Amino acid sequence: MCRGTETDLVDELLEGNHRALARVISKIENRRPGYRQLVSRLHSHTGNASIVGVTGSPGAGKSTLVDKLAKRYRDRGETVGVIAVDPSSPYTGGAVLGDRIRMASNVGDMDVFFRSMSARGQLGGLSTATADAVTALDAFGKDRIVIETVGAGQNEVDIVETADTVAVLVQPGSGDDVQMLKAGILEIGDVFVVNKADMEGADRTVAELEEMLHMRESPTAGLNTGHHGFQAVETPGEDETRVGGESVDGSEPTDGDEPEWSPSVIETVATTGEGIEQLLEQLDSHYAHLEASGELEAKTRNRYAKGIRTLLRNDIAALVERELDRRGGIDQLADRVARRETDPYAVAERIVEPIADCLDDNRE
């Protein structure tokens, strides 16, 4: 990429040109030459957007919910960026579903930028390009960035390290969803949403979620209280008090410190917009809790730490591949190991040795 063109593209993005934003994200997603310089230049302009992750099993209604969330943010006068991560094609590596029309409530609204991206085969559902696209949207000045994950179940853990707040969607009457939550995804949710709450079985799903959350906070809570009914969600009472006297909604610290966040269960019907306002209130409350407790700063630091490690692993892996090619390729080395002419540890040591020597020589 021409340096001048790259500079112009960044300047146009920072000036609010949506076409420039789209071009930058395309370069980021396709890893075209110069994308790293683009992201580097944009980094100093970030740090102002709040990032919400929406995950859950396929069919839970994530896309419709994200559509309604974006609409409600716009009603409040905020600008929105949406990244919808799709399964990647085994043939092209691109998004299987492509630029599907999922933002029906926001068609024609230039302040809602929607982009569908491929998971690029990542088990966690998010590729490094997703985080870089978030950087572009943040630098552009979007107030809210919403990431909708693929929805592959337990593998949806990367979203915790990319988003400030994670909403986990569950649909009523799905035993598989509840089993999925028990299997681990329960740990990643800051807010749990029972979408399609007008369906039969919604009350039971809410109750099961509430019970699991209480069991997570205090393993004996479920034994003492038995089954938590649906009304426990809406009726304030003793269930709002956490162990140690801390408030569930994080608003009443009892010992001078910010209390821990306790996830809540919200019922929504995304197709009609029912419950969306309550969901937004919970998302806002969680973000306020992150700021007040200092967790937002810690999450941001951890996010960058993970990003640095990921880049280093990728770059070093590329160096190793080049060294392998220089020594005849991995097949030739494997053949030598098979003939007992050498062993895997010796091969690895010889491949890494020049890289280690280079680092030692350049160490201050």
Image (tube, rainbow, N blue to C red):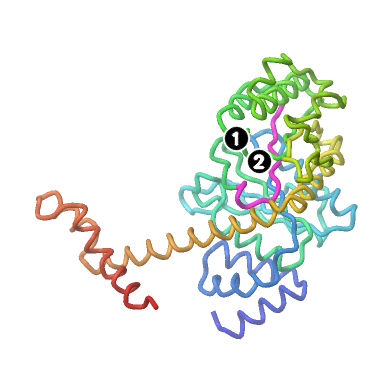
Residue 320 counted in the magenta span = no
Task: Where is residue 245? Give x, y as percent.
Answer: 78, 32
Residue 169 counted in the magenta span = yes
- Which of disc 1 and disc 2 is earlier in sequence? 2
In depth, the one of 88 and 134 nearer the eye is 134
Task: Where is residue 247? Give x, y as percent.
Answer: 80, 35
Whether tag 2 and tag 1 are in contact, CB under 8 A, the answer is yes
For mark 2, what is the residue? 55
Q: Quadrant of residue 30?
A: bottom right
The amino acid sitting under disc 1 is: Ile
Q: Residue at x 63, y 61 (%)?
A: 133
Judged from the image, the secondary structure of the residue bearing numbered disc 1 is helix
Count neighbours of disc 2 (C-alpha within 10 A) and say few if under 14, some if 14 to 19, many if 20 or more: many
Quadrant location of the N terminus?
A: bottom right
Left or right: 80, with 29 as reference point: right
Residue 61, label in figure: none
Label 2 vs label 1, nearer the camera: 1
Q: How far apart are the two marked residues, 2 and 1, measured between alpha carbons? A: 10 Å
Residue 185, label in figure: 1
In depth, the one of 243 and 132 nearer the eye is 243
Left or right: 22, with 289 as reference point: left
- What span is colored magenta in the figure? 159-171
As drawn, 359 above or below 80: below
Task: Where is residue 263? Give x, y as percent.
Answer: 73, 35
As drawn, 76 above or below 39: above
Q: Quadrant of residue 13?
A: bottom right
